[in-house]
Image (cartoon, grey):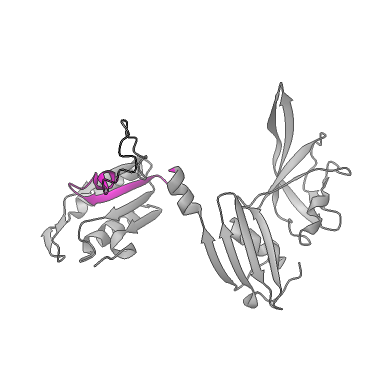
Amino acid sequence: MADSTAATWQFWIDVGGTFTDCVARRPDGRIVTHKLLSSGVYKGAAASGSTAMIIADPERRHDPPRFFEGWRITLLHNVRVGSDVRVETLEEDVPVLGFDPASGALHLGRPLRWPPGMTYELRCGEEALITGIRWLMGKRLDEAIGAVEVRLGTTRGTNALLERQGAATALVTTAGFRDVLRIAYQNRPRLFDLEIRKPADLYREVVELDERLDKDGRVLQPLNEAEVCGKLAGLRERGIISLAVCLTNSYRNPAHEQLVERVARELGFEQVSVSSRLSPLQ
């Protein structure tokens, strides 16, 4: 892929649970595409002509020149155990010093074992969307991408909700409302089931704070910062790294939620979402 001025590149990227699809408009107006794993890993197999210092893979001949320089490679081997096939790791973190797309040859930084049927995985440590941009622009790891236009869509958030995965999260709410999400709207999609099985909660723990605002946002019970510090510190000690903060009537007066957010960030929570900013309903 020929390199061009970064400022005029435009990208449309969809990051899914398995694959990332990239569409780009080059500076000359031509549309180019690339599809890769959302893990950012490139997989392949050592073909005939591979040696202890070179992995030959004809499938790599469509990749940009020198693209994999600076990447790390993991070498794998399929081992049959009875009727099962188990993948064993032969070597990890082998540096790639050079890449020749004419032959698909990956030149390695140290010698390795090469049993028949060896496969490999290439990693660079960057997110798939960045890797996709680099691939389309022909940029190596040591080259700056520059200014580009990117429109990004992703299903990762939806997948995390459906699969109940993601960061360890706690709900922070007003005292007396800890079960409001469990109660929800009392929808009964299977009304006549004799055994109701509710879905798992999206959060791991709930913290209730003694505070209250009226419907107009006036303070009925002030929020005690020391209480906030103590309860949030306990969450951090138990491995919680993400907070969803939803205090009653905060859309009328966000002061209490802002205090919780400030304390949470001071304590090192990685993600803090507050309802008064995300959904300021009137």
Name the quadrant containing residue 127: bottom right
Give the total of numbered labels. 0
- Residue at x 81%, y 56% (from the top left corner): 61
- Is residue 126 visible from the viewing direction of this image? no
- Residue at x 56%, y 54% (from the top left corner): 16
Q: Which residue lies furthest to the top in this view?
A: 82
Left or right: 165, with 39 as reference point: left
Name the quadrant containing residue 34: bottom right
Quarter of the image that includes the N terminus: bottom right
Q: Does the magenta segment cover residue 190?
A: no
Q: Residue furthest front?
A: 192
Task: Residue 136: give x, y in percent of width and height.
Answer: 69, 65
Task: Residue 278: give x, y in percent of width and height.
Answer: 34, 63
Q: Relative to 117, say whether 136 is above or below.
A: below
Left or right: 64, with 164 as reference point: right
Quarter of the image that includes the C terminus: bottom left
Task: Residue 264: give x, y in percent of width and height.
Answer: 32, 54
Q: Does the magenta segment cover residue 170?
A: yes
- Is residue 152 visible from the viewing direction of this image? yes
Left or right: 216, with 97 as reference point: left
Q: Which of 60 and 282 is in front in this view?
A: 282
Q: Relative to 183, say whether 280 is above or below.
A: below
Q: Relative to 256, say whether 236 is above or below.
A: above
Name the quadrant containing residue 135: bottom right
Q: Which of 231 and 214 is in front in this view?
A: 214
- Residue at x 24%, y 44% (from the top left corner): 179
Task: Residue 86: give x, y in percent of width and height.
Answer: 68, 29
- Residue at x 27%, y 55% (from the top left corner): 246
Magenta span of residues: 164-187
Left or right: 117, with 247 as reference point: right
